[in-house]
Amino acid sequence: MTRKGFIANAEKLVVWTTLTLPALLLITGFLYYTVEDYKENNYPYPQIVEDKVVEMRLLYNQNCLATQGQDGRVYPGTIDISSLSQNTLSSCLDSDEQLPVQVRILQENSIIREATTPSWENAPITDPRRRTYIVNLASGEPATAVFRYK
């Protein structure tokens, strides 16, 4: 390699180093401060995620509302309305801070069955939300499950 080629390569190395090193430091600093901010502030996950987890647990768990057949198979989305009660909701949503939830099962716009968690009555209305699902009853008839939150 000639001296001219060596100097040209060294100049390129200096230029690339001066461009990439600050960029890497900037990206690393941004990621570090983003993670630290997240850890310090403990950002809660969105309320819709918590609502969805509650609903899926109630509709798809065999110990909650989902129907279990004679063969032991669980039929998610097919609910047994006789199991809908305050005790069922309390045991399925067991936590230190129980979410105020009301579950209504409707058929042709009339309420068949309704249950609430114990915290429903005394909870203030801070963020009213409602979500609706089409489900099947254990008898095979279609129905609507309405979840209301305070």
Image (tube, helix red, strand yellow):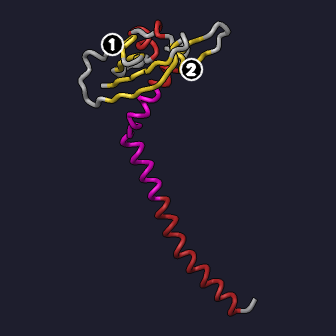
Q: Earlier in the sequence, mark 2 or mark 1?
A: 2
Q: Position of residue 61 (x, y in %)?
A: 54, 18
> In this view of the protein, which residue sits in the foreground, 39 or 77?
77
Task: Identify the main secondary structure in magenta.
Answer: helix
Q: Residue furthest front?
A: 108
- Segment colored magenta: 29-53
Which type of secondary structure does the marked residue at label 1 adopt? loop
Magenta stretch encompasses residue 37: yes
> In this view of the protein, which residue sits in the foreground, 15 or 67?
67
Q: Position of residue 96 (x, y in %)?
A: 38, 19
Q: Position of residue 37 (x, y in %)?
A: 39, 48
Q: What amino acid is found at the position of numbered circle 2 in the picture?
A: Pro
Quadrant hosting residue 73: top right
Question: Is residue 128 shown to the viewer in this render?
Answer: yes
Q: What amino acid is found at the position of numbered circle 1 in the picture?
A: Pro
Residue at which label 1 appears: 118
Above or below for 22 versus 109: below
Q: Position of residue 89 (x, y in %)?
A: 42, 14
Residue at which label 2 appears: 76
Question: Is residue 103 shown to the viewer in this render?
Answer: no
Q: Assess disc 1: are there few (<14), some (14-19) or many (≥20) residues with their C-alpha within 10 Å of its C-alpha.
A: some
Taking the spot 54% from the left edge, 11% from the top edge, the residue there is 138
Q: Assess disc 2: are there few (<14), some (14-19) or many (≥20) residues with their C-alpha within 10 Å of its C-alpha.
A: some
